[in-house]
Amino acid sequence: MKNDTWGRVKQQLLETVGRNNYANWIEPLQLQKVDNGVALFSVPTSFMANWVARNFSDQILKHLKALDVPASRVEFKVETVNAADTVRAASSDSSAAAPIARAASESGPSVEELPGAPLDARFTFDNFVVGKPNELAHAAARRVAEGGPVTFNPLFLYGGVGLGKTHLMHAIAHEIQVRDPKLRVLYLSAEQFMYRFVQALRDRQMMDFKQLFRSVDVLMVDDVQFIAGKDSTQEEFFHTFNALVDQGKQIIISADRAPGEIKDLEDRIKSRLQCGLVVDLHPTDYELRLGILQTKAENYRAQYQGLVFADGVLEFLAHRITTNVRVLEGALMRLFAFASLVGREITMELAQECLADILKASDRKVTVEEIQRRVSEHYSIRLSDMIGPKRVRVIARPRQVAMYLSKQLTSRSLPEIGRRFGGRDHTTVMHGVRRIEELQTTDSQMFEDVEMLRRALEA
């Protein structure tokens, strides 16, 4: 068969499979020979060989026959492996489909070769403090880490900053690797996934990218909200997700909010993320904060030997610092370091002196009413109009700003915020919040207004 004949077939395939499919799957094919009714093509990777054999072999064979090429089937040979690694695709008149070859590497890339984020040795199940706000998330993470049949896929963990999402994901990865070191576990952030996708596009290595991400046994993606609005990255994530689920592989995802609340995330991805187990890590309560402090304090006592720790200090901190676990742990670390440097006993007075800024910030409780008053003054509108029925732009926009700040600076739920704005529905509040989020990215004046109001309210 002459090269110009294959060129005509490729041109016909371009018209039938589309430009993207052609560039990804057809263009890299190299015709080697036609012998004994077999058209043999070389391909760069085994993943590509399998994919083309399953999805395009019939079309290739059809176009070859239309040009009187004596081929009854096509085969795809991976250039980098031996002749045994050949993918056969049977012709339509064959009585049985020929077998599809397995991937070039039986085990795939090892854990060490996977281009994920490094795991933190501190984040294990042993040092994760369990309380009522996180017990369901902890139990679900434990179940996934135990392996065996996949019971819910994906496991989706969501919650605010410093509530333990990343800790649990690292703990799952550690536990899986201990139980079965042969499993390929890939943990990375959504930002890293996007970066590697863009890099693969730039370097024309999409086949390698697809083979890598679809050959893992467990895929863990942290902070998935960062791919929202990135259309091409979402497209690839969607297909990777489906490919792994179809193979029965485990997927674990985390985000700062529930799937349905992630703005600019495609509906089909939201649907996939919601089809497994979605678990909310709630803000910490007093008992959980105290348990975390007690665990950390024991570790610090071993590190800072000789320090005297007065009774009641941990209880004091658990009551006063309610922001999140990271702030709590940072405060305790600062307290121990300060006491060690100055050679003083850790007392209530020392804690108040050393942590004055953190305690002051924790004491500051912004109310919805205060936000409404401050925003009304800033935009020179009446407070009664802020919570009234008027929808004119000069009032509606400040109202949306106040709703946005209420969502950001208070712990009130959307229905509660809506009630404080004249009994409005929570969907109205959600629309207002999203509108201000959008405007801040395009309107510099809006961004400055919101930041100025935020600083004034937090001062």
Image (tube, rainbow, N blue to C red):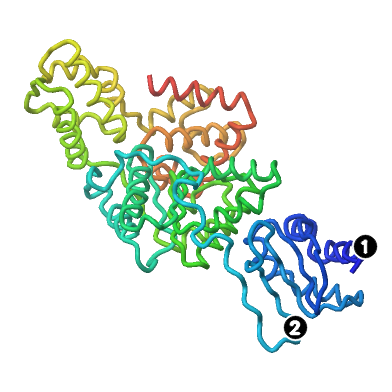
Mark 2 or mark 1, which is nearer the start of the sequence?
1
Q: Quadrant of residue 321?
A: top left
Q: Given the current orientation, which residue lies at the most extreme bottom position?
A: 95
Residue 182 locus on image (x, y percent): 40, 57
User: Which residue bears the numbered disc 1?
Assistant: 4
Query: Looking at the image, which residue is at 41% across and 42% down?
Result: 417
For label 1, the SS is helix
**Mark 1 burial class by Cα count in 10 Å: few <14, some 14-19, many 20+:** few
Quadrant holding the N terminus: bottom right
Query: Looking at the image, which residue is at 52% across and 56% down?
Result: 270
Quadrant holding the C terminus: top left
Residue 186 locus on image (x, y percent): 46, 50
* Camera-nearest residue between 126 and 325: 126
Query: Looking at the image, which residue is at 43% across and 48% down?
Result: 254
Q: Is residue 67 left or right of residue 371?
A: right
Given the image, on which type of amino acid does mark 2 rest?
Ser
Q: Is residue 162 above or below residue 103?
A: above
For label 2, the SS is loop
Residue 374 locus on image (x, y percent): 44, 24
How far apart marks 1 and 2 lie (CA) works out to: 25 Å
Given the image, on which type of amino acid does mark 1 rest?
Asp
* Camera-nearest residue between 127 and 157: 127
Q: Is residue 252 above or below residue 41?
A: above
Query: Looking at the image, which residue is at 65% across and 56% down?
Result: 80
Q: Is residue 220 left or right of residue 172?
A: right
* Camera-nearest residue between 126 and 285: 126
Answer whether labels 1 and 2 touch (C-beta < 8 Å).
Answer: no
**Mark 2 burial class by Cα count in 10 Å: few <14, some 14-19, many 20+:** few
Q: Is label 1 or label 2 in front?
A: 1
Residue 137 locus on image (x, y percent): 31, 53
Q: Which mark is residue 60?
A: none
User: Which residue bears the numbered disc 2?
Assistant: 92
